[in-house]
Image: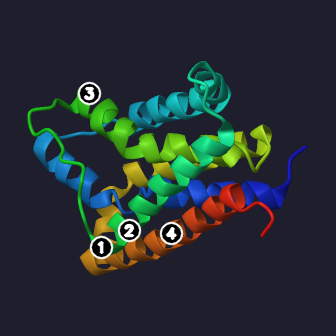
């Protein structure tokens, strides 16, 4: 059964983790280096990765003997690190300047920029707290947002400016830190 509150929570959490608005400077830089970026191709590739991990992620964990709670704690730590990076302005991802337009749409935009370790970990972590159908809707809503943002990066760059992009990135970083602490607490200290 679809639950609007769960869908909204999942959508906002994934939006924060994916941080497509915070990735605009990276996308703009890649566009300048390789030319056109295929927004549709990048969005579809990222969506396939996210849905596959939503469906098969638990099976993959069971193959390695890892519980969902264990993965949720590890995911909380990764989400915490991502949030800290966003707040501190640290850049881990360095795009390959020799990449072509087609390959750049998949690597690094679809993976790992959109559907990276943080996103996939978050999907599986959220699966322990939210229904799969609500997660799927949240993923689709984020894919729509991703597509629109990728298509309009030039316009967003002009409207928000560098200061606006920096502020958004830090706000979502604080949200991620809070989410990470909540997930960690609920899996380490479930009685609280």
Instruction: Measure the alpha-carbon separation of dots 4 and 3.
Output: 34 Å
Chain-order first, disc 4 or disc 1: 1
Q: Residue 38, position in %: x, y?
A: 33, 35
Instruction: Measure the alpha-carbon separation of dots 4 and 2.
Output: 7 Å
Instruction: Measure the alpha-carbon separation of dots 1 and 3.
Output: 32 Å
Dot 2 alpha-carbon crowd within 10 angstroms: few under 14, some 14 to 19, many 20 or more: some
Front-most of 165 and 173? 173
**Residue linked to disc 3:** 102
Instruction: Determine whether the residue tagged by mark 4 lies in a helix, strand or loop.
Output: helix
Instruction: Determine whether the residue tagged by mark 3 lies in a helix, strand or loop.
Output: helix
Asked if residue 34 is positioned above or below residue 190 in the image, the reply reads above
In the displayed structure, does residue 31 sit left or right of residue 185? left
Find out whether the residues at labels 3 and 2 contact each other: C-beta distance under 8 Å: no
Quarter of the image with the C terminus in it = bottom right
Q: Which mark is residue 84?
A: 2
Dot 4 alpha-carbon crowd within 10 angstroms: few under 14, some 14 to 19, many 20 or more: many
Dot 3 alpha-carbon crowd within 10 angstroms: few under 14, some 14 to 19, many 20 or more: some
Instruction: Determine whether the residue tagged by mark 2 lies in a helix, strand or loop.
Output: helix
Residue at image x 27%, y 51%?
Answer: 27
Instruction: Measure the alpha-carbon separation of dots 4 and 1.
Output: 12 Å
Front-most of 27 and 36? 27
Q: Residue 6, position in %: x, y?
A: 78, 56
Find out whether the residues at labels 4 and 2 contact each other: C-beta distance under 8 Å: yes
Dot 1 alpha-carbon crowd within 10 angstroms: few under 14, some 14 to 19, many 20 or more: few
Q: Nearer the viewer, mark 4 or mark 3?
A: 4
Quarter of the image with the N terminus in it = top right
Residue 4 location, quadrant: bottom right
**Residue linked to disc 1:** 88
In the displayed structure, does residue 4 sit left or right of residue 29? right
Q: Which mark is residue 177?
A: 4
Find out whether the residues at labels 2 and 1 contact each other: C-beta distance under 8 Å: yes
């Amino acid at each position: 059964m679809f639950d609007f509150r769960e869908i909204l929570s999942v959508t906002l959490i994934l939006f924060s983790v994916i941080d497509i608005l915070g990735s605009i400077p990276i996308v703009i830089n890649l566009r300048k280096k390789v030319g056109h970026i295929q927004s549709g191709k990048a969005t579809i590739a990222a969506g396939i990765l996210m849905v596959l991990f939503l469906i098969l992620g638990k099976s993959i964990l069971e193959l390695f003997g890892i519980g969902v709670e264990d993965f949720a704690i590890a995911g909380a730590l990764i989400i915490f690190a991502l949030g800290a990076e966003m707040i501190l302005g640290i850049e881990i991802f360095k795009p390959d300047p020799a990449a072509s337009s087609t390959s750049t749409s998949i690597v690094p935009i679809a993976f790992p920029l959109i559907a990276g370790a943080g996103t996939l970990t978050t999907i599986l972590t959220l699966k322990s707290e939210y229904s799969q159908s609500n997660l799927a809707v949240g993923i689709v809503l984020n894919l729509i947002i991703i597509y629109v943002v990728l298509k309009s990066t030039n316009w967003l760059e002009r409207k928000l400016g560098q200061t606006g992009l920096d502020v958004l990135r830090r706000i979502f970083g604080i949200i991620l830190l809070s989410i990470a602490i909540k997930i960690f607490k609920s899996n380490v200290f479930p009685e609280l």
